Amino acid sequence: MLAGLQNISFEFGARSILQDATWHIQPGERIGLIGYNGTGKSTLLKLLVGEYQPSKGAVERSRGISIGYLHQDLLSFDTNESILTVALGAFARVLELEKQIELLGVELEKSGDEKILHQYSDCLQEMDALDGYSIHHRTEEVLQGLGFSNDDLQRPYKEFSGGWRMRVLLAKMILQQPDLLLLDEPTNHLDLPSIEWLEKYLLHYKGSVVMVSHDKYFLNRMVNKIVELYQQELHSYSGNYDFYEKEKAVRMELQQKAFENQQDYIRQQERIVERFRAKASKAAMAQSIIKKLDKLERIDAAELIRPNIKINFRVDKTPGKVLVELKGVAKSFGKNCVIKHGVAEIERGDKIALIGANGKGKSTLLRMIAGTEPLDNGERKWGHNVEESFYAQHQLESLRLNNTILEEMKECGSQMNDLELRGLLGCFLFSGDDADKKISVLSGGEKARVALAKVIVSKANFLLLDEPTNHLDL
């Protein structure tokens, strides 16, 4: 066993995430960790690496195990260093040896001291053992596999968007070659060529991998085991996602039958109690039945059908036929020309999918249309009565962490009252007291739902959506 959880329980305040959960990760396993948004998948990974401590039970790790953990919180990291330098940080010991070899070489030229010669020789041997002379080539290869061009490698890390930064950190983690990789939604922000590269890499990776993903096709290709976090428990399925779906249906049917049988038994026993509790000769028997029912471990009803998000796009104004026109627009970043002589016309009723490789300017074009990105040249002309709303990944980062969900919705400038806002949030699967949760405790998927709900509140008649399904579950 590489790592695992033994009879773990964990809570966030009064909210139970795990109850008496056990899970062992074995060498060579490819595990897909799944569950609805907000059930605690990311929390589970943080327990494995020691960022959180369980309220009960033990986290187990093999002695000397190295764990690489890619998580969404890494986006807070910032630096002026080039992305190549950041990724090369995977080889801390090799970089240290490079400096030592250079310094010892200078000393050796000056003195020829035998002690320095031995130190120099030892460093060279260790460098060879670590395959240190190939780190630059390997790092460039991984970064280019994840979609960076050769010109990108010397660009400062801070110039890149959140998705591209995540790729740099993924590259660094891959280069470290840990015994266990924990990947929290690794395909978010990756285009198809980069996903294919990552799949190829993981297929040949010698360690074990646990990946949280909402991409069923990715899971079907990459995993040999599914672990589902469901009703505070962990359920394992020895197969890919398709296998899980079939087995889960059988398990849910059995659970529902067991629940219904237990409910029939409880109702039967309660009828007996009701019949005999008033009779002195039967009172002791009635009390005995009550005590047994109190001690009975209740079976939960199976969640046979999960409610879907219900989105009703309401608009206050009907726009004219043409929503927006772009005439001869251009945009460059330094020497990188993103769009040249761009011409487009978007009409009422159009449903347009904007596709292209990462880094080719899709998000830039959306910002240009929305008016949040200045044009270098050309003209953007709005149509009559157009009210646009722009959803992008940066909006998740702009949510106020100390706000409750309801407070965040109120800041949209909507005229809806609390009751109406709670009703809207119910359509996004935030029911009851969920609206009073702090943004800071929400998962990535829950934050995405809040951001989408804010788009709906705007009652816009023209929506611009940049990767709206990132972080959303199946």
Image: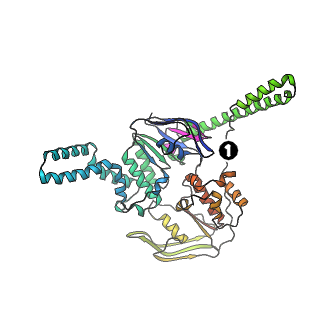
**In the depicted structure, whether residue 30 falls above or below residue 384:** above
Q: Look at the image and tell me whether residue 355 can be seen.
A: yes
Q: What residue did someone put label 1 on?
A: 305
Q: 126 or 137, which is in the foreground? A: 126
The x, y position of residue 402, in whole percent, is 58, 58
| Snapshot colouring | rainbow
Quarter holding residue 382: bottom right
Within 10 angstroms of label 1, few (less than 14), some, or many (20 or more) residues?
few
**Looking at the picture, which amino acid does disc 1 mark?**
Ile
The x, y position of residue 178, in whole percent, is 39, 43
Q: Residue furthest top?
A: 281
Instruction: Give the magenta part as a residue range.
Output: 219-234
Where disc 1 sits, the SS reads loop
Q: 386 or 435, which is in the foreground? A: 435
Q: 310 or 428, which is in the foreground? A: 428
**Residue 232: in magenta span:** yes
Q: Look at the image and tell me whether residue 428 can be seen.
A: no
The x, y position of residue 181, in whole percent, is 44, 43
